[in-house]
Image (tube, rainbow, N blue to C red):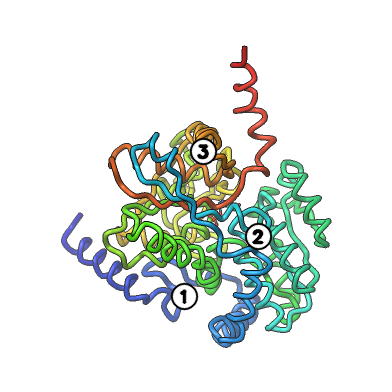
């Protein structure tokens, strides 16, 4: 690195620690911003003004805290994992978002934004979903606050994730099949945005990860930092110390930024984000955006992307549907550029092995997404013996049974005498 490069990097880090991001323009250093058509600007500005008025107001925070406690089931447990620790030669702690209502961290964001939609006087909510987990969380949160919910879902994903389509319908949502574009998550986001533009005052767009145009990456981060704030206090109380390493999986980046953010200023805590390495490093074989991507604009934000040399967004692959996205939130791009967080990829095979190990050692069936964090933690532990590791367990694995049946369970049955 050049001297100016090092100085710029140090400045980004100092600004990140000082809480300067996002700035006025919704930027995280060189990343972030708001790259949207003119037609969306009034709706987004209205959302931004609404956030300024309500998000940190005492009565909104009180209402949110009540719902998080009595409906979501927070605080979620911090579980000491001594048998995983013995295998890895580490002191291992799991932050249990799998125990949150609907089975993952996504509900923290969904209920927060649904309450906000009510405050802003919206008459209906639209959301997008890929694997269906955010659609289910949105449908549940909208039912809870009494707002009708329309979920856009790629036709390909509807076929792959049929049980979640049924869950959304039971929870009262209308699920709309998206047959344009790639017929997966990317096209579903575009359709939800298109719907929002047609009625920016009456409709609220409930975005599911720390991505998209400003202020969404900020809003989602603020709603997910409950994970890191709880985990930090719980670990300090139980272990009497901060972790040596903090590790979470990164798809769009919401559970990870929620866990990481309250630790950014703790220089002694090493922070590691784990992406989906899929079948390998070739373009199209993974979803490791930070580890392998290049800068560009996708869905309203300037961040890192998986694209070819002509700037075409690439098809991605991961055994875990929730990590299968070619972009990533701009704050992660900043934290990587500032040298505060490092990002590594874990393969499909390593993630599947981690599901099995966590089941056997701790009696917990983790989501395939979360298993990436476990596999990354195991690798880190082996390179750094005897350390304390805090892992974000973003969700439970019940939703992954069809994938697990055709992989791990088939192998288990074949190995039986
Ligand atoms: C959706 C999902 C993820 C990935 O999304 P992020 O926004 O990166 O957190 C990770 N884990 C689980 C269980 C999920 O459902």
Name the disc covering residue 358, or none.
3
- Earlier in the chain: of badge 1 and badge 2, it is 1
Q: Nearer the viewer, residue 36 or 137?
A: 137
Left or right placement of residue 260 versus residue 124 in this view:
left
Sequence order check, earlier mark of 3 and 1: 1
Residue 383: tell me if it is visible: yes
Pick the front one: 407 or 285: 407
**Rendered image quadrant of residue 405:** top right
Q: Is residue 154 above or below residue 12?
A: above
Residue that badge 2 annotates: 189
Q: Quadrant of residue 295?
A: bottom left
Q: Name the quarter where the N terminus is drawn.
A: bottom left
Q: Residue at x 36, y 61 (%)?
A: 335
**Residue 357 in the image, given as x and y percentages of width and height:** 50, 34
Asked whether disc 3 touches disc 2, contact meaning CB atoms under 8 Å apart, the reply is: no
Q: Residue at x 60, y 72 (%)?
A: 37
Bin the neighbour count of mark 3 within 10 Å (Cα to Cα): few under 14, some 14-19, many 20 and up: some
Q: Residue at x 82, y 56 (%)?
A: 169
Residue ID at (77%, 44%)? 162
């Amino acid at each position: 690195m050049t001297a100016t490069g090092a100085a710029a990097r140090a400045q980004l880090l100092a600004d990140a620690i000082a809480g300067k991001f996002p700035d006025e323009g919704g930027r995280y250093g060189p990343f972030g911003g708001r790259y949207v058509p003119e037609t969306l600007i009034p709706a987004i500005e209205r959302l931004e003004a609404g956030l300024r008025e309500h998000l940190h107001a005492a009565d909104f925070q009180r209402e949110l805290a009540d719902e998080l406690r009595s409906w979501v089931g927070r605080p979620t447990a911090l579980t000491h994992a001594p048998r995983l620790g013995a295998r890895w030669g580490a002191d291992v702690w799991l932050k249990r978002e799998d125990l949150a209502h609907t089975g993952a961290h996504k509900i923290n964001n969904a209920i927060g934004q649904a309450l906000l939609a009510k405050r802003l006087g919206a008459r209906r909510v639209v959301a997008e979903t890929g694997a269906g987990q955010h659609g289910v969380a949105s449908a549940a949160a909208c039912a809870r606050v009494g707002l009708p919910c329309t979920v856009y879902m790629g036709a390909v994903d509807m076929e792959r994730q049929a049980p979640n389509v049924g869950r959304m319908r039971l929870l009262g949502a209308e699920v709309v099949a998206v047959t344009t574009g790639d017929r997966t998550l990317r096209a579903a986001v575009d359709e939800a945005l298109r719907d929002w533009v047609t009625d920016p005052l009456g409709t609220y767009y409930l975005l599911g990860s720390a991505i998209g145009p400003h202020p969404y990456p900020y809003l989602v981060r603020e709603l997910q930092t409950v994970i890191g704030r709880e985990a930090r206090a719980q670990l300090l109380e139980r272990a009497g110390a901060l972790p040596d390493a903090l590790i979470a999986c990164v798809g769009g980046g919401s559970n990870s930024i929620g866990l990481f953010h309250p630790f950014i200023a703790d220089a002694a805590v090493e922070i590691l984000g784990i992406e989906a390495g899929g079948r390998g490093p070739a373009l199209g074989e993974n979803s490791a955006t930070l580890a392998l991507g290049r800068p560009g604009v996708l869905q309203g934000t300037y961040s890192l992307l998986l694209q070819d040399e002509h700037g075409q967004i690439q098809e991605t692959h991961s055994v875990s549907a929730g990590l299968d996205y070619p972009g990533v939130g701009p704050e992660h791009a900043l934290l990587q550029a500032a040298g505060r967080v490092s990002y590594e990829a874990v393969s499909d095979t390593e993630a599947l092995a981690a599901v099995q190990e966590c089941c056997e050692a701790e009696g917990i069936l983790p989501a395939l997404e979360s298993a990436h964090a476990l596999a990354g933690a195991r690798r880190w532990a082996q390179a750094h013996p005897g350390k304390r590791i805090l892992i974000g367990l973003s969700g439970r694995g019940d939703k992954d049974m069809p994938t697990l049946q055709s992989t791990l369970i088939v192998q288990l049955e074949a190995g039986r005498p």
